[in-house]
Amino acid sequence: MRVGDLLTELDGRFPFDGAGAWDPVGLQIGGVDRPASRVGVCHEITDEVTARALGAGITVLVTYHPLLFAPTTSLVEGPGSSGRALKLAEAGVSVIVVHTALDAAVPGTGDALADALGLPRAIRLPDSEDPEAAMIGRVSTLDEPMEPDALAHLVATRLGCTVRATAPAGPVYSVALIPGSGGGFIAAAAAAADAVITGDVSHHRAREGSELGLFVIDAGHASSEMPRSSKAIQLRGRGDVEQLKSLADLLDLHDIDLQIDKLLDDRNSLPELEGYKAIHGTVDRLTSELAQAKSSLKQTELALDKSNGELEILVEKAAAEQNRLYAGGLSARDADYMRREVDMLYAKVKGLEDEVIVLMEQREIDQQRVETLTGDLAEATEQKNALAGVIQEQWRLIDKEIGVKEARKASAIQLVDDDLLEVYDDLRARRSGRIVGRLTDGICGACHLRLSAAEVVRVSREDPPRCIHCRAILVV
């Protein structure tokens, strides 16, 4: 396949004539007749991407952002875009840019941003005075109004970024989506929606939005573009395509993993859990004590019923014997015997009456204990259920946020090389805490220890670079 064939394929998916007039889309370095035997795709051509492309034998780089944007008068060795362009040109690597051609396609970058945020289906931003805003922008009408702060939180959690927002201007019924640098389209967004999600918004543009009654959320340039550009140009159906993935993507993945770890830790260490554990133990104890109290009351009542029955029989027998004694007709000897028998029966009656009184007092004590324990158990159960409700609600919110992070993680994993991911997963299994850090001014972002200049050179040659102190993976 030639570069020209690849250009034709890309133009069919993301028509170049739909891009902004100012945007250098299409072939930026190389020639249409050059071979496209090994294709690499990326969001932006950085020094790292350039090195990986040259090392992988890439013949064509398809990039979202242009490598050369401002007018370039020279290509000389050194840092910056001109230095990278020279390296690629000298190595015979062609560069194709899709940028706003991808934005303007259907579905475009704004549609993907709406999908990533879980917003309803978006349509093109209506603005007859600004065709470019209509080309790039989208607007989504919400199923239900949303509070501005809730929308800003949704953007931050779904995109995993830090957002800047203007003062709330009332409920949001519709949202404009302008990925990338949308500060110049504030007026068009205000004419079509209650809020806008974009990037690179200056102070003055933000104030303009507020004055127009628009709630402005600045999610950052790259964060607002990545939901589409990270997937759209991967050309997945081709065996000769390599996604040039950056170590910075691994850092993003690790940040998401650390956020998930914290959420799981928060889930397992809610302050209410200790209270719930204590009240659960109290409920179990009271349940057991109540069962024992009820059993004791039942035994007392059975004993009382038995004693009352025996007393009733004994009283009747004593009365009958006494009546025989008073009826007369007995010999002196029989009368004396009968008198002693009646005295003995009434003595037994007196003993049983005392026993019944004791059992009645015990029954009252048992009934009072059952009543007290029943009330205590009902109160403890109510407290337990209330705490369970609080915990379940907090778990629901945490699990919802974990779900958002897991969705972002699933996307982030796609941007990391399989071999690198294997090293990362192995480190994660053996160590907790930060295992990926950015190397800044010779300082490891994981352990915060400094590497010497020679050590920086040495670790930069490793694949992947690893800190000599903590063995964390370094983004250099």
Image (spheres, helix red, strand yellow):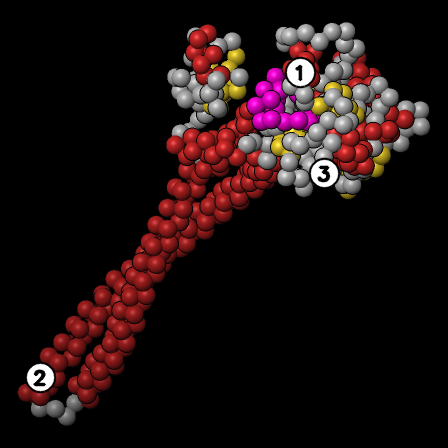
Q: Is residue 467 left or right of residue 404?
A: left
Residue 115's disc number: 3
Q: Residues within 10 Å of mark 1 (few under 14, many from 20)?
A: few
Q: Which mark is residue 90?
A: 1
Checking the image for residue 337, the label placed there is 2
Disc 2: CA contacts within 10 A as few (<14), some (14-19) or many (>=20): few
| Residue in the foreground of this view, choosing between 18 and 336 | 18
Q: Residue at x 70, y 29 (%)?
A: 35
**Which amino acid is tagged 3?**
Asp
Q: Nearer the viewer, mark 1 or mark 3?
A: 1
Q: Nearer the viewer, residue 408 or 320?
A: 408
Task: Give the mark nearest the N terminus, 1 or 3.
Answer: 1
Label 2's element? Answer: helix
Mark toward the start of the polypeptide (3 vs 2): 3
Residue, far right: 128
Residue in the foreground of this view, choosing between 462 and 294: 462
- Crowding around mark 3 (Cα neighbors within 10 Å: few <14, some 14 to 19, many 20+) is some
Label 1 amino acid? Glu
Task: Tell me if residue 413 is in the magenta stretch.
Answer: no
Q: Which mark is residue 49?
A: none
Q: CA distance from mark 3 to mark 2?
A: 107 Å
Disc 1 and disc 2: Cα gap in Å? Answer: 138 Å
Could you tell me residue 43's position as x and y percent?
Answer: 67, 26
Q: Give x and y (percent) for residue 232.
A: 71, 35
Q: Is residue 50 magenta?
A: yes
Whichever of callouts 1 and 2 sits on the residue coming sooner in the sequence is: 1
Numbered disc 1: secondary structure: helix
Magenta-drawn segment: 45-64
Please identify the quadrant where the N terminus is shown: top right
